[in-house]
Image (cartoon, rainbow, N blue to C red):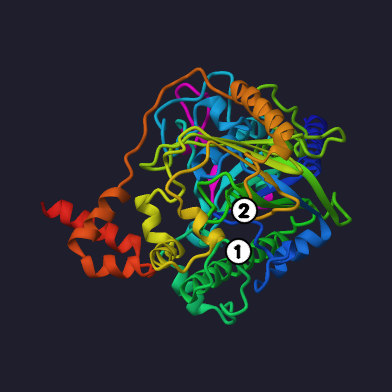
Amino acid sequence: MKYIFNISAILTLIIYFSVSLFAQEKPNIIWLMAEDIGTDLECYGMPAVKTPVLNKLAESGLKFTNTYCTNSICSPNRSAMMTGVHQNKINAQHHRSNRDVPLTKNVQPFTYHLRKAGYTCIIGNELVMRKGRKIDVNFKYSETGEWDGENEFGLFDKKDTFTPEDQPFFAQIQLVVTHRGDWWNSIRERSKHPVNPDKVVMPPYMANDSVIRIDWAKYLDQIEYMDHEVGLIIDDLKKKGMYENTIIIFIGDNGRCNIWGKGYLHDPGIHIPLIVSWPKGIKTKQVRDDLVSTTDITATILDFAGIEIPKYMTGMSFMEKDFNRKYIYSARDLWDEVMEKSRSLTGKRYRYIRNYMPEVPWDAHQAYLEFYRPAVHVMRKLKLDGKLDKNETLFLSNSKPVEELYDLVNDPYELNNLAENPGHTTTLEQMRKDCSHIETEMTSQDKTFHPIFPVAVNVFDFVKYKYPTNYLEMLNGKEIGFRKFLDLYKERAVQQ
């Protein structure tokens, strides 16, 4: 019996150490998504901002200069990233719609494949603002639990913390501070070195106004706070002895929330940072100018984990030697109460945009954005006073062109639409044809459409008619606080 027990104990130890070795060989993966930012980091050349933690990650890993979203709004782009499939192909393109509709049977969230391969999947982290748990996808899901796509729709195993016992683990952490929010002023007030609005350098399509400059400085303050949060996560990894074998992927979930940014298919709306760090596996700094789609990040995570990339995915691993994209295909559809349909192709040199609803202006007076874009309010007023130049007035046009074509090398701010320039007819015709072909490939046959009515529409009217003094402050570029008036609106609704 003693002999048998010893053999059993030895076998148990062999199995234990084999499993432990397997867990250690597979890398941990952390996907950090900073909300609503462009390539506005110090390591990407943005003036006046300091991002030492992300600078260091970029200096020791991979920095990508041409990474683009498949949609310029959070939930459609997140839907694409969660599945590795372009959001239009799975009927997830309309912002906060179809939340009661399961994915088709042949498509699963990428965490499903990670979990099958032995990964513990974690959402959020207790070290960051609001614990970073945002998922926000346009199909039926639950935060945690099992997934079979029919009766169970859990995306993650646990929340907020990773431990050595969780290895190998995948953690998706949202860095919400950079999202437009009522906390921007307090973050700036708490900063030991708030960004000097006199030193910010803004794009030429924005008016040089003091309100706009301070708003830009506040945005950079949030980026600095976010950089500090990334440092807290890295410190936690080091304390737990897991840093060396953890891949950190840092991106923006869509472009910055400002003029031409979030919600539009121009560069500020879809061009995001991508930094990949892995102390154990990536030893030297590399700057790559490959065209990378956000769905490619999803596919690459599976590749890092040693998982075969499913054929249904439209994303590809950018770590493969033959990785090469000619274009990034992006789309814009419903955003709150504003229905849109625009499509774009981004190449290394040119960007083509097709606007199917040119009658919907870029400045569509969307209720939620009225609370969070002081630059728009200020520039509307300056336009009425005749104080904007041609570039600054463009965003406030009454309609959009049906087609847009920009030379991104010679016109990075996309101020000169070449669509009607005879010298670019060949490029226009080719990109129009290619865009139409890809659009057909990426269009779902499912036409289910279950949108969620945006409460911001009611809150905006509530402020306009019940709090006219605050409404006038908003029109002059003051952020009056959406959450405060949302709470007041809800209280009034209960009383009635």
Query: Can you see residue 354?
Result: yes
Name above or below for residue 16 compared with residue 251.
above
For mark 2, give the secondary structure: loop
Name above or below for residue 289 compared with residue 344.
below
Instruction: Identify which residue, 187 or 146, lies in the foreground.
Output: 187
The stretch in magenta equals 141-164
Q: Is residue 342 left or right of residue 29?
A: left
Q: Residues within 10 Å of mark 2 (few under 14, many from 20)?
A: some
Which residue is disc 2 drawn over?
415
Q: Residue at x 78, y 32 (%)?
A: 8
What secondary structure characterizes most of the magenta part? loop
Q: Quadrant of residue 317?
A: top right
Q: Please state which amino acid type lies under the numbered disc 2.
A: Leu
Q: Please state which amino acid type lies under the numbered disc 1.
A: Pro
Q: Residue furthest front?
A: 422
Q: Position of residue 233 (x, y in %)?
A: 64, 61
